[in-house]
Image (tube, rainbow, N blue to C red):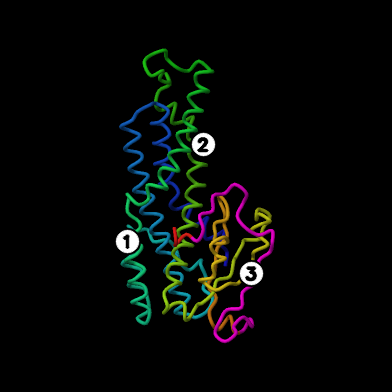
Amino acid sequence: MNADKFLEGLGSTHARFYFAAVHDLYVAKVRGNRPAAADARHELARVMAETIGAAEVLGAMMTLQAAAKGARFAAEQTVLPRVTLAEALDDLVARAPVTLRNAAERTAQKIAELYTEDRVMAFVRSAEDTVTREAQNFVSRAFREGLAENEAGRRISMAVEQVRELTEPWSEGYSRMVFRTNVNTAVTAGRFRQSQDPEVRAVVPAFVFDSVNDSDTRHNHGVLDGVVMAVDDPRWNKLSPPLGYNCRCQVRHVSVVELEAMGRLRDGSVIASSIPADGGPDPGFRHGGRPDLL
């Protein structure tokens, strides 16, 4: 499974929606335009609800595919649907094998409850706090460089298009990081959420940690590559991806057949890997635990 290629494909297609909303929010903050900031905040909530929700649907869909095949699946065969969240949820149930239709319906109902604009406001507030700090830094630099008027509110004298041009590089880099981290979190949540269903867990009862293992892979991520544990093992609460910003790691389902071939089943229970002492989240990264439990 090429997790890096998988996430890059998602980012190139969908990150632009994050960028547009983040950039509008940044420009509004710099110019002190509260109505425009409120509009941008609402749009960011809408974009997050749709894209993160659809990403969790994708994770759940991968789980159902793995359960249906009872073996390793290829992530490159599945793409994030270019549809609304409601359509993605319908698609999740429609694509589920008949034997797993009830499991898919239960998961679809839960995702529908979770991904509303109101419920993603924690994501939005986190992004807005970062954008606000950067906007304040931008304004401070502008004052030092004499690019402000001495009027009520001490507004930046630059035209809005000039502000947009100067703030674009930061907005693009930040929005891609936020998108990648949030989408990876949501895909992982979908995998775990669907995997907890008893009908699915009976077929694919374990995950294996899958890191990219290239020159950009962080050491504390790479040492976890190949770690196998049951889908409900409490240690996933510390080790579920992402383990840092821009993390490309994934979890991959392991079927009963695979576990038997690996010698990792004993009396129907998964024989878990030992965890390397130096494996885990990046220092300073606020790892919230298994994302389906948040």
What kind of secondary structure does the magenta stretch mostly adopt? Answer: loop
Q: What is the count of numbered marks?
A: 3
Name the residue tied to disc 1: 112
The image shows residue 27 at horizontal and vertical percentages of 41, 31
State the residue at coordinates (46%, 36%): 131
Q: Residue at x 44, y 79 (%)?
A: 68
User: Split into 4 quadrants, where in the image is the C terminus?
Assistant: bottom left
Q: Secondary structure at mark 3?
A: loop
Q: Position of residue 177 (x, y in %)?
A: 52, 47
- In this view, the residue farthest toward the top is 150
* Residue farthest to the front, as pictured: 234
Mark 2 secondary-structure assignment? helix
Give the residue displayed 52% in from the left and 60% down from the top.
Answer: 6
| Residue 159 shown left or right of residue 170 in the figure | left
61 or 83, nearer to the observer: 61
Identified by mark 1, the residue type is Ala
**Amino acid found under the numbered disc labelled 3:** Gly
* Residue in front for this viewpoint, 276 or 11: 276
Would you say residue 34 sits in the magenta stretch?
A: no
CB within 8 Å, label 3 to label 1: no
Mark 1 packing: few (<14 Cα in 10 Å), some, or many (20+)? some
SS assignment at label 1: helix
Residue wearing tag 2: 169
The relative height of residue 36 versus residue 276 in the rendered view (above or below) is above
Checking the image for residue 226, the label placed there is: 3
Question: As shown in the figure, which amino acid type bears the numbered disc 2?
Answer: Pro
Q: Which residues are magenta?
A: 261-290
- Please report whichever mark, 3 or 1, sits nearer to the chain's N-terminal start: 1
